[in-house]
Image: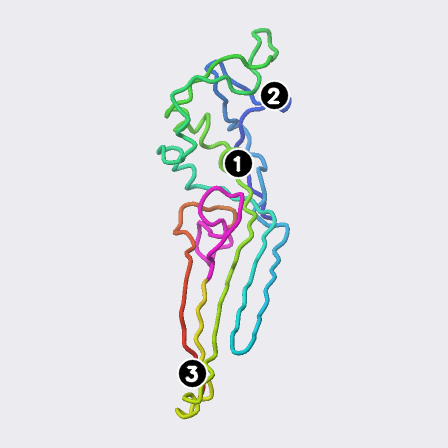
Amino acid sequence: MGSLYGYKWTYIDGERYIASDGLPVINFDERVKVGNAFPDFVSSIGSDFKWKGIGFNFLFEYKKGGDLYDSGLRNSIRNGNSLSTLFRDVLVVLDGVMDDGSGGYVTNTSEGLIDQNYYRSSTQYNRASEVLIQDASWVKLRNVSLSYEIQSKFISTLNLSKVSITASANNILIWTPFDGFDPEGNQYSAGSNVYGFTGLSVPISESYSLGVNIGF
């Protein structure tokens, strides 16, 4: 359940294969398991404090594990919007192995040109699962709110039992290794049972509210 399958670079005995042009090659002969969308666990901790008419509560959530395929990142790479594509128009010797000319393999020494064509190439770079699959673990401040119950004789003269003011914020802080929008977001609609894809939907937003609670 939750397994993600995709394409990876070609490997020879665990070493990435580098072709004669000095660049890697994605293996489209076989789709392999590249991750799992389901988290190891999700936990939360929160509390609610009250003191002399002042209330404060918060809720933290922690999701451990769960991988995401970022379709938006692939588009950003192809269009040169990702910061990673600033590294371009340079010759580099990539880690890996190359043909030795005798049917074997040796450490790569061939230079490859990293340019816009490399980033736009679906056979060399932007469809590799090593680039697009990321750990979507996160710690999130789900909610925090502060309230104050007004203590005044004026309240009773209005035949009110209480008046309180509350300010709250939702989804305002997140700590995650995921490089992209909030990884809690899903590329598909809320009613979909498809997990593990993100990047082509409106990001989850922060929200703030201010309310007044009047009791009669």
* Colour theme: rainbow
Label 1 vs label 3: CA separation? 56 Å
For the record, the magenta segment spans 170-194
Quick one: SS at disc 1? strand
Label 1 vs label 2: CA separation? 18 Å
> Counting residues from the N terminus, which is met first, the one under dot 2 or under dot 3?
2
Q: Position of residue 140 (x, y in %)?
A: 53, 55
Q: Position of residue 103 (x, y in %)?
A: 60, 10
Q: Looking at the image, is mark 1 or mark 3 nearer the viewer?
A: 3
Q: Residue at x 46, y 32 (%)?
A: 127
| Looking at the image, residue 76 lies above or below residue 47 | above
| Looking at the image, residue 188 lies above or below residue 76 | below
**Mark linked to residue 177:** none
Instruction: Write down the residue under mark 2.
Output: 12
Quick one: SS at disc 3? strand
Quick one: SS at disc 2? strand
Residue 90 in which image quadrant = top left
**Label 2 is placed on what type of residue?**
Ile
**Label 1 is placed on what type of residue?**
Gly
Viewer-closest of 28 and 91: 91
Image marks 1 and 2: residues in contact by CB distance under 8 Å: no
Instruction: Write down the residue under mark 3.
Output: 214
For the C terminus, the image quarter is bottom left
| Looking at the image, residue 152 lies above or below residue 19 | below
Viewer-closest of 61 and 185: 61
Instruction: Write down the residue under mark 1.
Output: 6
Residue 5 lies in the magenta stretch: no
Q: Residue at x 50, y 22 (%)?
A: 24
